[in-house]
């Protein structure tokens, strides 16, 4: 259970880094040197660049996930028809699940990469921040 808790904490922390990486793409975002997360963790310019690169790679991978099995309106059609279509519903839900699973895979891969970019001290700070946030 402790290992699971750690994994959840690291995932939540990595989500924060995701926001830092996305900030570079938003026109109104502060410069990396002024970003609160970057300042709080004292991320180097190299770390910011690596995290941004990891985020761009994740976005590219997610955009390339095939959605060919997802058919528009199938679930609405079943509901509107008044006839239950077991196969259509199961196929559609399976297609959604497949895409969601692939997105989760790329997110975890991204979080792992971000974790590798951080120094041991930064990882410790992230864990401390997460446990403090969870206790509030």
Image (cartoon, grey):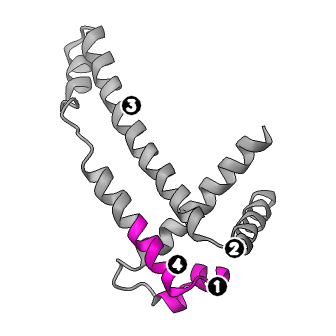
| Residue at x 70% of width, y 67% of height | 123
**Secondary element type, mark 1:** loop
Please tell me whether residue 53 belongs to the stretch shown in magenta: yes
The residue mark sitting in front, 1 or 4, is 4
Would you say the magenta stretch is mainly helix, strand or loop?
helix
Label of residue 97 in the image? 3
The residue mark sitting in front, 2 or 3, is 2
Tell me if residue 81 comes above or below residue 37 in the rendering: above
Q: Say which label, 2 or 3, has the lower sequence index.
A: 3
Please tell me whether residue 28 belongs to the stretch shown in magenta: no
Label of residue 122 in the image? 2
Q: Say which label, 2 or 4, has the lower sequence index.
A: 4
Q: Are marks 1 and 2 in contact (CB under 8 Å)?
A: yes
Total labels drawn: 4
Q: Measured from the top left, where is residue 16 in percent x and y?
A: 56, 66
| Residue at x 42% of width, y 65% of height | 54
Measured in 3D between alpha carbons, the distance from the residue under mark 1 to the one under mark 2, in whole angstroms, is 8 Å
Q: Say which label, 1 or 4, has the lower sequence index.
A: 1
The foreground one among 100 and 114 is: 114
Measured in 3D between alpha carbons, the distance from the residue under mark 1 to the one under mark 3, in whole angstroms, is 38 Å
Res 96 quadrant in image: top left
**Secondary element type, mark 3:** helix
Within 10 Å of disc 1 (Cα), the crowding (few <14, some 14-19, many 20+) is few
Label of residue 42 in the image? 1
Q: Is residue 115 left or right of residue 61?
A: right
The residue mark sitting in front, 1 or 3, is 1
Label of residue 47 in the image? 4
Start-end of magenta stretch: 32-54
**Secondary element type, mark 2:** helix
């Amino acid at each position: 259970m402790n290992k699971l808790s750690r994994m959840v904490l690291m995932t939540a922390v990595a989500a924060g880094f995701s926001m830092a990486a996305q900030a570079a793409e938003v026109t109104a975002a502060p410069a990396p040197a002024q970003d609160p997360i970057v300042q709080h963790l004292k991320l180097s310019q190299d770390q910011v660049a690596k995290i941004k690169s990891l985020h761009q790679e994740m976005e590219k991978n997610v955009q390339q996930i095939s959605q060919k099995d997802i058919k528009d309106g199938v679930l609405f059609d079943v509901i509107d028809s008044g006839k239950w279509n077991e196969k259509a519903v199961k196929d559609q839900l399976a297609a959604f699940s497949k895409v969601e699973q692939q997105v989760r895979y790329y997110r975890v891969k991204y979080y792992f990469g971000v974790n590798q970019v951080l120094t041991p001290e930064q990882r410790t700070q992230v864990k401390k921040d997460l446990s403090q946030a969870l206790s509030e």
